[in-house]
Amino acid sequence: MSLEQLRDKLNEINHELLKLLSERAALVQEIGQLKEKQGVPKFDPVREKDMLEELVAANTGPFHNDTVKQLFKQIFQASLHLQEDQHKKQLLVSRKNQKEDTIVSIGDVQVGAGSPIMIAGPCSVESLEQVREVAAALKQAGMTVMRGGAFKPRTSPYDFQGLGIEGLKILKQVSEEFGLKTISEIVHPAHIELAADYIDVIQIGARNMQNFELLKAAGDSNLPILLKRGLAATIDEFIHAAEYIVSRGNKQVMLIERGIRTYEKATRNTLDISAVPILKQETHLPVLVDVTHSTGRKDILAPCAKAALAAGADGVMVEVHPNPAVALSDAAQQLNIEEFGRFLSSVRESGLFK
Ligand code: PEP
Ligand code: MN
């Protein structure tokens, strides 16, 4: 055969191989769907090993056994990716499933519609006076949404645990007085329904990101949910936690990056800024950044808030207390009202926030 003829033959084989690979891929997708239904893991190392051994036994050359193994491993890997992609597409929170951004409505405040929001307020609700003082300052600064913890999940059982329902009542009273929307953390599934009587958004805290019963209860609520990333949660785990809520029917979910545990000690946690564009790309949910808990440092809040907004965040959360020195939680990292004013001016000057 001439070189030309040999090349033609090779082209033909390439096409046959491609056809066979595509047929194989279609089968793999079918298997993936069956496994999904049965809840069986996609990756089956024993089956992969058996297939490789069978192929090596059938190999008559000229490729070396190791080369045959290498080639087929590539095919197996690509097949696994195909199954995983399919799984991602099936997630309700996935961008592949819904192209348009989800807009979360907190009354007339829209999150994810293009104008970033600022959520500010004390770490804990401590008294009516304390919350009123912050609310007045926030209102004057043009803020629309206030945060305040009534149920505080603390590392030590001896630390202030929050005022509980009393705290929610304070938030309600102050929000009515100042016309602010409120966000507060709920830690028990039994309190999810009751929350609707007092607050506008339910926060699920970092420590509860994988409290699946709480997520399910949040999914049954009519209130918007602000879901915090777990202390050591991967982005994939974060996305699946949100899926728990959305799969129960509550589509009003916002994600908030609040720093993750790393070996770095210069900050309380490490702000994973890359999570913002990744979450925006992978999901259609609004993505926010909590600069206070991620850094634990007042001196870098403004640049971190700007970085978050520049990376595409739909909002920023920051803690503000009338007198941080005597705060019952997070005393070191809360801004006082004057500091908040400076923080806000600096973020506004960047043009990233109105
Ligand atoms: C909070 O926002 O009040 C809080 C406790 O934060 P995190 O759950 O992110 O630690
Ligand atoms: Mn705090």
Image (cartoon, helix red, strand yellow):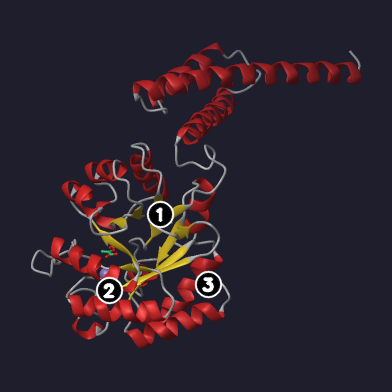
Say which residue label 2 marks: 122
Q: CA distance from mark 2 to mark 3?
A: 21 Å
Nearer to the camera, 117 or 92: 117
Q: Where in the figure is residue 127, as x and y percent of width and height?
A: 17, 75
**In the rendered view, would you say 199 is above or below 343?**
above
Residue that lies at the very extreme toward the bottom in this rendered image: 338
Mark 2: few/some/many CA within 10 Å (<14, 14-19, 20+):
many
Q: Is residue 310 left or right of residue 126?
A: right
Say which residue label 1 marks: 255
Q: Where in the figure is residue 133, as x and y percent of width and height?
A: 27, 81
Task: Indicate the amino acid at tag 3.
Answer: Phe
Q: Where in the figure is residue 202, as x and y percent of width and height?
A: 29, 55
Say which residue label 3 marks: 353
Residue at left offset 51%, top offset 70%: 307
Mark 1: few/some/many CA within 10 Å (<14, 14-19, 20+):
many
Q: CA distance from mark 2 to mark 1?
A: 20 Å
Marks 1, 3: nearer the viewer? 3
Q: CA distance from mark 1 to mark 3?
A: 19 Å
Nearer to the camera, 209 or 67: 209
Residue that lies at the very extreme toward the front in this rendered image: 177
Quadrant of the image occupied by residue 40: top left
Determine if residue 164 is in view: no
Residue at left offset 50%, top offset 77%: 347
Of label 2 and label 3, which has the lower sequence position?
2
- Secondary structure at badge 2 equals loop
Mark 3: few/some/many CA within 10 Å (<14, 14-19, 20+):
many
